[in-house]
């Protein structure tokens, strides 16, 4: 079968990547979607069970740092579009092992760019009809004060953690490939995502699971840091829109205009989980445990996504209350998915991580 587009999505077995793969596979049966994922601890093919037999879906277990392999995949599948999500994504892990983050996020992105450059420049039509779309984060902008200001696309990069420094560096390489070689590139900076299939080292799935098991909820510092939360399917919709209609060489902020102080969000989570488990209101509040703060913990993130709204008409579709209810229900209904992850190696990692907090 001849496909209309041939697209690599890297990191498609991870949290956001799996939602992007699902959306593209279902919405565009005439696109060939090639999920390129190394299946690190964060990659899980169970996230894609519902679409794994679709005729337009292909999976390749590969490392984005492996230039030969990525080059071979580019020409084998005649790739014309890349949506690049594969990364090391957890800030706490980056504090423990910054080199791994530089390797995957910087060298991996550079390897993807170089392999795309090599293949696309060898095509008769060159870069025409091609796109390298890089998925970045709001964390590259640094931290805001509690003063109502927001990150815009013009905000100067000021990363603080090894994770955000590695993502900032990869963003610069993406822009450099446009400016130096004329590669059609784009990038987006999104705020905190939540929803099904998120690895339970991140705040929301971790806390839902801990409440279910009556384990302590480790709140960093005073719980006063602020994050701007977006339902993951709204992020995937934005990626679809920008991939098809975004401006080459441009960048867009994606966010929910939905800021929450951690401790307030945690109380909403407790209330929701308790209600759905049939516990009395306030039953799990005693699990809140204040622990040593994260090193260099950014105080506040807030994304101004009005450019995306004004230029392409995107807005979040879900109210936060609705999104949290759906999310909590999903984790409680999919205990097997969670238990498969939280047993064994990850459990040992988690215990080690919190031993000294
Ligand atoms: P995740 O950790 O859940 O998934 C990452 C995926 O990348 C996994 O499937 C993993 O196996 C794969 N991967 C890691 N190293 C690889 C390598 N060397 N080669 C091939 N595959 C590799 O991450 P996520 O939360 O879904 O984030 C996806 C992307 O979105 C990342 O680039 C992240 O920086 C960005 N982002 C995340 C958020 C968020 O809230 N989670 C917000 C904004 C931006
Ligand atoms: O802003 C986008 C970023 O959001 C993405 O680029 C990252 O990939 C993603 O991991 C996320 O980063 P955060 O560090 O904001 O997410 P995390 O879920 O780790 O933490 C959210 C907030 O909760 C943060 O202020 C730290 C706090 N926290 C987190 C954990 C895991 C706790 O208080 N206790 C915890 O156990």
Image (spheres, rainbow, N blue to C red):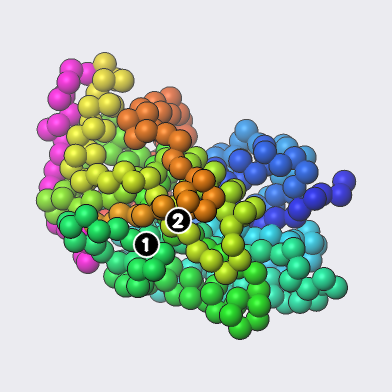
- Magenta span covers which residues? 279-299
Return the mark for residue 307: 2
Q: What residue is rendered at 76% in x and 53% in y?
A: 5
Between 225 and 98, the residue placed more toward the observer is: 225
Total marks in image: 2
Residue at the front extreme of this rendering: 310
Q: Would you name the residue on which mark 1 appears?
A: 152
Q: Disc 2 vs disc 1: Cβ atoms closer than 8 Å?
A: yes
Q: What residue is rendered at 44% in x and 40% in y?
A: 316
Residue at the right extreme of this rendering: 1
Mark 1 lies on a secondary structure that is loop
Residue 175: horizontal and vertical position, in percent? 54, 74
Locate residue 233 relative to residue 165 in the image: left or right. Answer: right
Q: Residues within 10 Å of mark 1 (few under 14, many from 20)?
A: some
Helix, strand or loop: magenta stretch: loop
Locate residue 168 relative to residue 22 in the image: left or right. Answer: left
Judge whether residue 285 is colored magenta: yes
Q: What residue is rendered at 26% in x and 33% in y?
A: 269
Earlier-in-chain disc, 2 versus 1: 1
Mark 2 lies on a secondary structure that is helix
Could you tell me how far apart the alpha carbons at marks 2 and 1 are, in whole angstroms? 9 Å
Residue at the bottom extreme of this rendering: 180
Return the mark for residue 213: none
Locate residue 215 relative to residue 137 in the image: left or right. Answer: left
User: From what the image shows, is residue 323 above or below residue 298?
Assistant: above
Residue 278 seen by the camera: yes
Residue 333: horizontal and vertical position, in percent? 43, 25
Between 120 and 67, the residue placed more toward the observer is: 120
Q: Is mark 1 within 8 Å of ligand 2?
A: no
Residue 39: horizontal and vertical position, in percent? 55, 54
């Amino acid at each position: 079968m001849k496909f209309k587009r041939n697209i690599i999505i890297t990191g498609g077995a991870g949290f956001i990547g799996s939602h992007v793969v699902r959306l593209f596979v279902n919405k565009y049966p005439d696109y060939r979607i090639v999920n390129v994922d190394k299946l690190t601890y964060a990659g899980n093919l169970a996230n894609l069970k519902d679409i794994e037999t679709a005729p337009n879906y292909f999976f390749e277990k590969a490392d984005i740092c492996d230039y030969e392999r990525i080059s071979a995949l580019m020409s084998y599948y005649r790739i014309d579009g890349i949506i690049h999500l594969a990364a090391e994504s957890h800030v706490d892990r980056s504090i423990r092992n910054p080199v791994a983050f530089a390797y995957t996020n910087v060298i991996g992105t550079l390897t993807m760019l170089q392999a795309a450059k090599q293949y696309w420049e060898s095509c008769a039509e060159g870069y025409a009809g091609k796109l390298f779309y890089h998925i970045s984060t709001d964390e590259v902008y640094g931290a805001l004060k509690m003063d109502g200001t927001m990150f815009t696309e013009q905000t100067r990069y000021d990363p603080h953690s090894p994770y955000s420094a590695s993502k900032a560096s990869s963003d610069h390489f993406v822009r450099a490939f446009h400016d130096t070689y004329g590669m059609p590139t784009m990038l987006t900076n999104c705020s905190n995502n939540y929803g099904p299939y998120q690895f339970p080292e991140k705040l929301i799935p971790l806390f839902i699971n801990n409440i279910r098991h009556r384990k302590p909820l480790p709140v960093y510092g005073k719980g006063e840091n602020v994050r701007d939360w977006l339902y993951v399917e709204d992020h995937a919709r934005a990626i679809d829109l920008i991939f098809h209609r975004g401006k080459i060489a441009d960048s867009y902020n994606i966010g929910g205009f939905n800021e929450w102080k951690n401790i307030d969000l945690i109380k909403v989570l407790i209330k929701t989980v308790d209600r759905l488990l049939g516990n009395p209101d306030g039953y799990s509040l005693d699990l809140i445990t204040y622990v040593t703060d994260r090193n260099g913990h950014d105080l506040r993130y807030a994304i101004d996504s009005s450019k995306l709204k004004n230029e392409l008409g995107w807005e979040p579709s879900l109210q936060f209350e609705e999104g949290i209810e759906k999310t909590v229900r999903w984790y409680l209904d999919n205990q097997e998915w969670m238990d498969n992850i939280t047993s064994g190696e990850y459990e040992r990692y988690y215990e080690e991580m919190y031993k000294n907090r």
